[in-house]
Image (cartoon, rainbow, N blue to C red):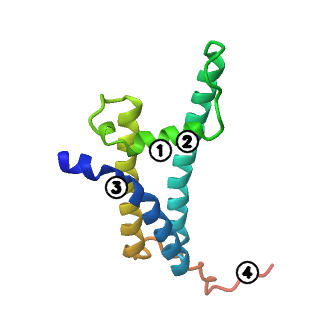
Amino acid sequence: MPLLMSAWPAVVLLLPALVLVSAIVFLAKGNRRAFAQLLALAACFLIGALLMEFFVFMAARMARSGSREAVLGMGTRQLLETMANPRSIAAQPLSLAAVAAYSVLAAYVWLLVTWALHLRGKPAGGAKKKKSAKASARKPARA
C-alpha cells in the first residue's frame, strides 16, 4: 500500500496518456468498437466533471455572502486533485475521495478490457452473418 500511495500521482497522470495513445491506435487499426469504448470512458469522466462543477456552483450559491464565488473549472480541478491525491486511496469507503480513487482503478480495468477485446479480434463462429435462404427447387404451381 505505501508503494501504491507514493506512485499514485504518476498512476493518475499516466491514465489520460494511455487513453489517448489507445484511441490513436484503435483509430489507425480501424477498430470502431474499441474506440467507442474509450469514448464511453471519456464520457464517464465528463459526467463526473460536470457533476463536480454543479456541486461547487451550488455550494457557492448557498454559502453566505462574502464567501468565494464559484469559478468555471473549479469543480473539474477539484475532481482532478482529489483523484491525484494519494490519501484518497485510504479514505473512508463511499466518500468522494474514495470514489475518485476507485474510479481511476476502474478506468484502468476498463482500458485493459478494451485492449483485450481489441487484441482478441473479431469473434469467430456465432457472430458471422447468416446466409440468405435459397429459393426452393420446386417450381411454383400454376393455376
For marks 4 and 2, give the CA distance. 73 Å
Q: CA distance from mark 3 to mark 2?
A: 18 Å
Residue at the disc numbered 2? 76
- Residue 32 image offset from top left, x and y in percent: 55, 70
Mark 4 vs mark 1, CA separation in Å: 74 Å
Q: Sequence order check: which comes first, mark 3 or mark 2?
A: 3
* Quarter of the figure with the N terminus: top left
Identify the mark nearer the N-term, 1 or 3.
3
Which numbered circle lies on residue 104?
Answer: none
Q: Nearer the viewer, mark 4 or mark 2?
A: 2
| In-front residue for pair 44/49 | 49
Q: Tell me which amino acid carries mark 3.
A: Val
Q: Are marks 4 and 2 in contact (CB under 8 Å)?
A: no
At 51% from the left and 80% from the top, the residue drawn is 29
| Image quarter in which the C terminus is found | bottom right
Residue where numbered disc 1 is placed: 80
Dot 1 falls on a residue whose secondary structure is helix
Residue linked to disc 3: 11
| Callout 4 touching callout 3 (CB < 8 Å) | no
Rate crowding at label 4 as few (under 14), some (14 to 19) or many (20 or more) other CA atoms within 10 Å: few
Please name the amino acid that badge 4 sits on: Ala
Q: Residue at x 58, y 29 (%)?
A: 56
Front-most of residues 7 and 54: 7
Inspect the image, locate mark 2, and give the three-letter code of the amino acid beneath it: Thr
Residue at the disc numbered 4:
141
The residue at the far front in this view is 66
